[in-house]
Image (cartoon, rainbow, N blue to C red):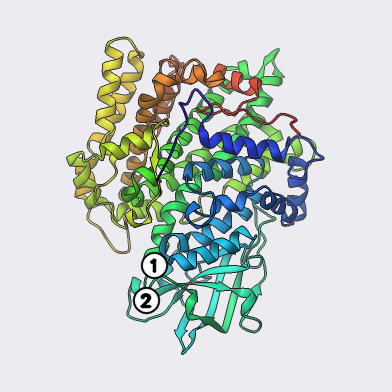
Amino acid sequence: MTHAGAAHPGATHAACLTAAAMDRRLGDPEDDGRLFSYARCAALDEREEFPLEICRELDLLGLPAHYVPAAYGGTLDSYEQVLQLMRAVARRDLTVAIAHGKTFLGAVSVWVGGSREQAERLASAVLDGAVVSWGLTEREHGSDLLAGEVRADRTAGGYLVNGEKWLINNANRGHLICLLARTADEGGARDFSLLMIDKQRLGRPGYRPLPAVRLHGIRGADISGVAFTDAEVPAGALVGAEGSGTETVLKSLQLTRILCASLSLGAADNALDLAAGFALDREAYGRRLAELPQTRRMLGESYADVLLAEAVTLVSTRSVHALTGELAVVSAVTKYFVPTVVDEAITRLGTVLGARSLLADGTHRHGRFQKVQRDHRIVGIFDGNTLVNLHALINQFPLLARQLKRRTVDAEGLAAATDLAAPLPGFDRDRLSLLPRTGTSLLQALADGVEELTALAADGTVPASLARRAQAVRAAVDGLAVELAAHRPTPVEVPAAAFTLAERYTAGYAASAAIHLWLRNRADAGENAGPAAALWTGGLWLEAALARVLARLAPGRPDPQDDVLDRLVPPLTEQLRAGTLPSLLHYPLVKGAA
């Protein structure tokens, strides 16, 4: 089974069409009378109130069907599509996106490790509106899942569950909870199993909800917990084989960590719209704020960061289908890199807005900026925080070093992941692997992409400066294989240098994602790309993205003679004025649509 990509990036990307249709049906978020408006979301946040009515509207519009694989009666056959849908929701409000999208996270372990009968049963519940939560973490153990104390002891009819899960999204509101519980005490990963528990069938005192915690961001979300006391759970609740829980969770995280990028991109869309719109309309010192050199530089840097994050997200999401066996690396890289870069961009954009970035009432745009800045900080914590994802890469250094040295590349998978017009194979859960035996094709193909860019510069197709930046990235990454191989894994105290190496690895991946995305799609990104066309011409967005990667690999003071970031501001202005998303793709936004 395959699904088609977009005709080319000059046309509206196929996944964006679905998201844009959802956006139109939700109506203009600037219209305070709309249910899913900026004004209503701000009011809910102020009251720390769950966005129940908005979530119900998303149910009525069919969003839950996109969380369910087509094989089980839903419409999920393209992870690109669900990512763009969640990006559209997150662009309006991160609290809503996190509250509603949690059902996919709660259900994904069954899609990855459950039986067909179990998957069909869960799919039916989700399509009927059931909310599913994912019970992984505990108060005393945080991200250390193997230290979990919640127990599920076998009985004649199933399991007896005892213990608490805490800081769980939708723990109170969820009808079902996919629970990671200890079923053995052998001292390893096989001690844990997953149970899909229907709380409505337990009854009290089998379980009791724990109070919701107060949060700095996503104030209206249900982040709480659940306690089990001799809860009788039927044997049919077991997901997969007993002892397979840890493996299933780790494989499921390979999908959810990539999809978390949708939250970051939505937040970036919102922040960029607010700051750039303000800079274009505001006057200072007799000139538009956007015309002042320092403001232009901050806008250019932020826009380049967002486009780089988008490039990584597009390629990583397509890799779910095309490079499935490499997702152990791809997901960790994406979950570290995208939220980190977007956090930095949002902070910089706050400087453009000045005092207005701090306003929390209706004085300026419903206090949207301070809300999105608060809300986004939690994205880097979901599904493994920044250090967890870097540590996941560090644990794989020996394997990654070998494949990087060999420059192993799955050419067919790489082509499908980077060419937006290429049809993608259907997602095959059996190809998920905890060990990326081939490393990551994208980084291992960096040298090939740089050589191709160098040839294009030689014949005048792209500026020589673009090739020079690409060569500089390659030079910065060239020594990685040797340095990764020299690292000696330690079980507890990981040296700071190892985290620096992991960060360099993610920067190299990001650069290669941008290079190959531009190379594979540049020929089709011209005449019908609308305001996005200028970004592709001469590799403008790519050169700006590589400049930002180099700033991470070799930080230093910006060269005042280097205007590549300044040259991004006119395309940004054109996209905003045309009412399209500031994006690599042509994506018209709703403007007062009914």
Q: Residues within 10 Å of mark 2 (few under 14, many from 20)?
A: some
Residue underneath mark 2: 191
Q: For the residues labelled 2 and 1, say whether their Cβ atoms are less than 8 Å apart.
A: yes
Mark 1: which amino acid?
Answer: Thr
- Residue plotted at (39% across, 27% down): 546
Q: To which residue does mark 1 refer? A: 246
Q: Which mark is residue 458?
A: none
Residue drawn where x is 27% and y is 61% of the image: 490
Asked if 540 appears above or below 592 in the picture, the reply is above
Residue 10 horizontal/vertical position (percent): 49, 22
Task: In the rendered view, tell whether residue 233 sits above or below residue 460.
Answer: below
Q: CA distance from mark 2 to mark 1?
A: 8 Å
Residue at image coords 42%, 73%: 193
Q: Is residue 512 left or right of residue 349?
A: left
Give the amino acid type for the residue marked by disc 2 in the picture: Asp
Res 496 visible: no
How would you rate the neighbour count of disc 1 (Cα within 10 Å): few for under 14, some for 14-19, many for 20 or more? many
Relative depth, front residue between 249 and 21: 21
Place of residue 210 in the rendered image (x, y in percent of width and height, measured from the top left)? 64, 72
Q: Which residue is at the front of the view, 223 or 359?
A: 223
Q: Secondary structure at mark 2?
A: helix
Is 448 situated left or right of 169 in this image? left
Task: Give the quadrant of the C terminus.
Answer: top right
